[in-house]
Amino acid sequence: MKLLFERSRSGRGSTLLPACDVPAVDFDQSLLRTAPPRLPEISEIDLGRHYTELAKQTHGVNDGFYPLGSCTMKYNPRVNEEAAALPGFTQVHPLQPQETVQGALEVLHRAETLLCEITGMDAMSFQPAAGAHGEYTGLLLIRKYHQSKGDTARTKIIVPDSAHGTNPASATMAGFKVVSVPSNEAGGVDLDALRKAVGPDTAGLMLTNPNTVGLFDTNILEITQIVHDAGGLCYYDGANLNAVMGHVRPGDMGFDCVHLNLHKTFSTPHGGGGPGSGPVGCKAMLEPFLPAPRVKAVDGMYSFDTPQRTMGQVRGFYGNFLVVVKALAYLITLGKEGIPEASAGAVLNANYLMKKLMGHYDMAYHTLCMHEFVMTLQGLARDSGVTAMDVAKRLLDFGIHPPTMYFPLIVHEALMVEPTETESPETLDQAAQAFLDILAEAKADPESLHHAPHHCPIGRPDEVTAARDPILRYGFAE
Ligand SMILES: *Cc1c(COP(=O)(O)O)cnc(C)c1O
């Protein structure tokens, strides 16, 4: 496909800039460019076709099944986008006097109340811009808490090896030492290893639950008890709340703080790097340390508030406000019945698809899963040379976005499948059939799978070079 620069023809297209309506300013000559910018010159219709063609070459939730494990690529109702596009929300300024933005403050306050109810927390900040940012903020809460008690010896955060990769990264960013504890046979935290790992230097534990192999840790109450007995606090990575919301609450399981990914569970599309939101919720004893400002309600009026011993700001103003608007719209439309139904559907769909593939593909763990399941293609790779990468690539030819590959690291040749609750049984049946067809191909003609996909505009790019050495500028000839 040609780039816009390659389609450009001198003099083509039109610039319809409005007449200048502000006084001209005499800049220092050294600040002015000496040649006009080399923008592509292209007619409107060709520009439109260019972007339409690009759009057709990509795969999104609107195109087909997108079972990208850990990412919750579910359908986000359009009506929530409409709510977030209302001028009353988009045309306000974060520095406006608070009496003129009562509606916006009410959105933040109501979303906080509902999400605290869902998580079993007492307070929440919407400042963090994404999940990992929420983790970082939660860890700063834990640090501030220990500091406030004069306890500076607590420098370590315990992270099970089945945690999401951002957990150890965030703990390191927040200045803690990471202590890894292994998983047991069943895929949960090894309790004996945890007992050995805790001590007077334990600041806390970060638990991803359901963990990255899609399992709910059945020892969760014991885990939080062990950490609390050692004087540490418990952090719940709630990015996967889609699996449990409305059924269990981190706050009831002994957790002191939690982050959520509104851009997974609560109706903001993601995957393209757009605005997200990773609110962090906490129990009352951590509330004084939350980022400022917060919104409080007194006698029906909303106002800004600075927590007593706030950590300061982790982002400008109140976070990605419009993402919170979408989350609130989603919460209100689903209501008390719809929220647990959504997570039940996510778990049902994952188990349905897992069951259809079981006996054909090897599962990493042989129990009921939560919202996602992990397969290991080690045996297939050994017997036929066909890898998880080959299967993932071939799925593209079936119009299916590949599952997450080679993650979690504790499972070899892993494919991690998360169907989400918004898929129909027909779609799941078709997906299962695609997986089975590919398995038959792997036995009959493994070689051809090494070259899949066969029908996509791009097949096997050099991903390392693309990530490490991206070409972000057009190389003009002269
Ligand atoms: C997605 C995810 C994260 C990170 O969220 P970002 O918004 O990408 O920073 C953290 N933990 C888990 C379990 C996740 O699935």
Image (tube, helix red, strand yellow):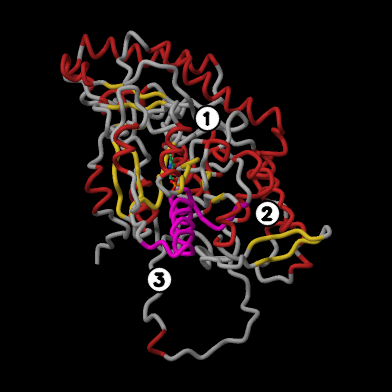
Dominant secondary structure, magenta: helix
Q: Secondary structure at mark 1?
A: helix
Q: How far is disc 2 from disc 3 in space, using C-alphas?
A: 43 Å
Residue 355: say if magenta.
no
Q: Residue at x 51, y 33 (%)?
A: 61
Label number found at residue 243:
1
In the image, taking residue 143 as reference, residue 330 lies left or right, namely: right
Which residues are drawn in magenta?
A: 123-152
Q: Residue 222 falls in which quadrant of the image?
A: top left
Residue 398 drawn above or below residue 16: above
Residue drawn 63% across and 82% down? 22
Give the residue at mark 3: 37
> Which label number is shown at residue 108?
2
Is residue 467 shown to the viewer in this render?
A: yes
Pair 1/3: label in front: 1
- The answer to which image quadrant residue 33 occupies is bottom left
Inspect the image, locate mark 1, and give the three-letter code of the amino acid beneath it. Ala
- Whether the residue under disc 3 has CB within 8 Å of ligand 1: no
Query: Which residue, as the protein is rendered here, is positioned at the far right?
Result: 299
Q: Earlier in the sequence, mark 1 or mark 2?
A: 2
Give how far apart the Cα atoms at labels 1 and 2 are: 24 Å
The location of residue 186, given as percent across then percent down, is: 34, 22
Q: Position of residue 311 (x, y in %)?
A: 51, 65
Disc 2 residue crowd, few under 14, some 14–19, many 20+, Cα 10 Å: many
The residue tagged with tag 2: helix, strand or loop?
Answer: helix
The kind of residue tagged 3 is Pro
